[in-house]
Image (cartoon, rainbow, N blue to C red):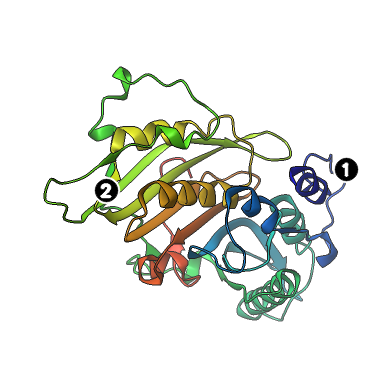
Amino acid sequence: MSNSVVEIASKHLGQTVSEYSDLYDKSLLVKVPRYMNREAYGIDEKNLPFVGVDVWNCYEVSAITVKGRPVTGVLKISCPADSEYHVESKSIKLYLNSFNMNQFGDHKDECVSIIEEVVQKDLSDLLETDVKCKLHTYDSLKPDGSDAWLGFTHYTNIESIVDFDDVEFSSYKSDESQLEGFSEESGEPITTQLHTDMLRSNCRVTNQPDWGDVYVHMTGTEIVTPESLGKYIVSHRKVSHFHEEICEMIYKHLLDRFNPEELMVTCLYTRRGGLDINPIRANKAELLDKDFCDVNFINEKTLRQ
């Protein structure tokens, strides 16, 4: 299973690029089947235990107008989690850089529209799903910040309530046995919203480290304890998977262990290679943050993004 994923993703990942194409080339894009990892964790492709999207923020996007004026911005992409494929990250980096010397439109706004239309069509065709995208230029952002998504500001950082200097960590291979629960004597449902920035996983192909923040919303008669969540997240430190896979693994382990009424997991990964990847998964559509998923809102960055 994993060898097949590596073979597909290795077209560009881990390879030396001797020359970057700066003329539009959609053949650079590589798609990776999602089922190859989901099968290993008991996730049924035909009956997914979640809804969600993968949100990509791409910072190396530029083309020129007919007169040669550069047009640059941040491209936000949203891809449904129920798509059969996801796009390999280095391939989209190379693809977006292939726009650099293309002349799109007579003026800036026309150039922006063409970039959006081309990328949206190419990714939708490649991944066989409905991909959304929006190119945010600096002068297009509202001065009052009303088009900025402000993040999970109401989530509690687990390091503010647990002294992890006194906690012993010994497992670094995605160990769900680290998860422990808490429940009220009354048996009433409890809601918790927790955040940690202790996520470190590794690229499936290159083994380069990936750093991220994890946000967990859970409601149930038994919920995860902050200390055990921290130990569990740290146990991914030597795991090699793509960002989307890590998010789904965390979600599935929490779902299987606690069977909560409500569950949402979001992983905000640190930018690498000119883009950041941010998967969100939930068992109810209303738990998905609308502004986070909406390409019309630019994401405020975490400390490490």
Q: Amino acid at mark 2?
A: Glu
Q: Which residue appears at 66% of the width and 45% of the height? A: 273
Q: Which residue appears at 31% of the width and 24% of the height? A: 164
User: To which quarter of the image does residue 101 belong?
Assistant: bottom right
Q: CA distance from mark 1 to mark 2?
A: 54 Å
Which residue does the numbered mark 2 point to in the structure image?
Answer: 222
Q: Which residue appears at 63% of the width and 46% of the height? A: 242
Q: Earlier in the sequence, mark 1 or mark 2?
A: 1
The residue closer to the viewer here, 117 or 211, is 211
Does 218 sit above or below residue 305?
Answer: below
Which residue does the numbered mark 1 point to in the structure image?
Answer: 18
The residue closer to the viewer here, 6 or 40, is 40
Q: Which residue appears at 31% of the width and 32% of the height? A: 227
261 left or right, relative to 114? left
**Answer yes or no: do the residues labelled 1 and 2 have beta carbons within 8 Å?**
no
SS for callout 2: loop
Does 111 sit above or below residue 257?
Answer: below
The residue closer to the viewer here, 283 or 154, is 283
Residue 77's x, y, as percent? 58, 66
Residue 226's x, y, as percent? 29, 37
User: Is residue 24 among what the camera can see?
Assistant: no
User: Is residue 194 among what the camera can see?
Assistant: yes
